[in-house]
Image (cartoon, rainbow, N blue to C red):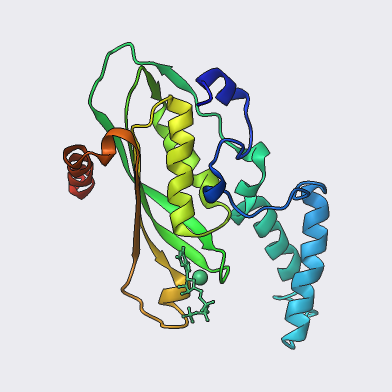
Amino acid sequence: MINNEEFQDEIGDNHIGLSAKNPVREDAFAISDEEKIEKIKKDVENILLTLGMDLTDDSLKGTPNRVAKMFVKEIFGGLNPSKKPKASTFDNNYKYGEMLVEKNIIVYSTCEHHLLPIIGRAHVAYISNGRVIGLSKMNRIVEYYAKRPQVQERLTMQIVQELQIALGTEDVACVIDAKHLCVNSRGISDIESSTVTSEFGGKFKNDQTRREFLDYIKLETKF
Ligand SMILES: Nc1nc2c(ncn2[C@@H]2O[C@H](COP(=O)(O)OP(=O)(O)OP(=O)(O)O)[C@@H](O)[C@H]2O)c(=O)[nH]1
Ligand SMILES: [Zn+2]
C-alpha cells in the first residue's frame, strides 16, 4: 500500500485497482482542454445538423460550444488527473476511535451507457488508523470521481479505494443510492426506481460494524 506522503504527490488513478479503473486511453490527455472543446464543438454541431436543427437560430447557435465546454470542464472534468483534489489528512491527535460517517453527499454523475445524468447520495465512512481526513475532502473525492462517464458500481469502488490510500487503512465504506435518468426518463421509464451500491473494506466487512454504518445513514438529520 502506498503511504500517505507518496499519495499526496500522486495524481491520477495509478493506485485504483485495474477492475475499478475507467476505460481511458493512454493518449487521453495528449491534447489540451481547449483543443478538446474545439473538436467536440464540431461533433455536437454535426449531431444537431444531422437531426435537422437550424444552427443559425439564436437559441441554438451557442449550443455546440456550450455542450463542449460542459463536457470537458464540468461533467467530465474528473477524467483529468490534474483536477484531483488534495486529500489533506491530519494526525488523529484527539484519539477519536469510532467510525466517522459523512452522509448525504450529493452525487451528480453521468451514465457512460447513455450519457444521461445519475443523481443521488453517497454515504462514506471510515475508522481512523492514526490519520483523519478533512470532512470536505470526502465530498471532493466523491465529486472528482463522479465527474466522469461512469457506472455506479465503479464509482463506489473508486471512492473507497481513494480513501483507503489517503487514510492508510482498509477500514472504509461507501454506499450510493442514485437515480439513473436512463432508467427513469427513457427506455423502461421507471421514475420510482433507484440503484443502491456498496463497498465495505476492512472492519466494515464485519456484520456489526456494517450495521452501525447503515443505521447512521438511516438517521434523519434535523436542524
Ligand atoms: N450495472 C449498471 N448498469 C447501468 C448503469 N447505468 C446504466 N446501466 C444499464 O446499462 C444497460 C445498457 O443496456 P443496453 O441494452 O445496451 O441499452 P438499452 O437498449 O438502451 O437498454 P434499455 O435502457 O433497457 O432501453 C441498461 O440496462 C442500463 O440500465 C450502471 O451504473 N450500472
Ligand atoms: Zn444509462
- Residue 54 visible somewhere in the drawing: no
Name the residue: 53% across, 50% down: 19
Splitting the image into 4 quarters, where does residue 103 fall?
top left
Placement of 98 over or under 191, stated as above or below: above
Splitting the image into 4 quarters, where does residue 54 fall?
bottom right
Placement of 112 over or under 60, stated as above or below: above
Q: How many marks?
A: 0
Residue 153, horizontal then vertical, whole percent: 44, 56
Residue 185, horizontal then vertical, whole percent: 44, 78
Placement of 123 over or under 112, stated as above or below: above
Determine whether, in the image, residue 31 is placed left or right of residue 110: right
Residue 47, horizontal then vertical, whole percent: 74, 78
Name the residue: 50% across, 26% down: 1
Name the residue: 80% across, 51% down: 34
Name the residue: 16% across, 39% down: 208
Splitting the image into 4 quarters, where does residue 90 fall?
top left
Q: Residue furthest bottom?
A: 52
Placement of 164 over or under 3, stated as above or below: below
Q: Nearer the viewer, residue 3 or 180?
A: 3
User: Which part of the image, by quadrant, shows the C terminus?
Assistant: top left
Q: Nearer the viewer, residue 96 or 63?
A: 96
Q: Residue furthest top?
A: 93
Q: Nearer the viewer, residue 19 or 91?
A: 19
- Residue 180 visible somewhere in the drawing: yes
Residue 117, horizontal then vertical, whole percent: 50, 65
Determine whether, in the image, residue 83 is placed left or right of residue 191: right
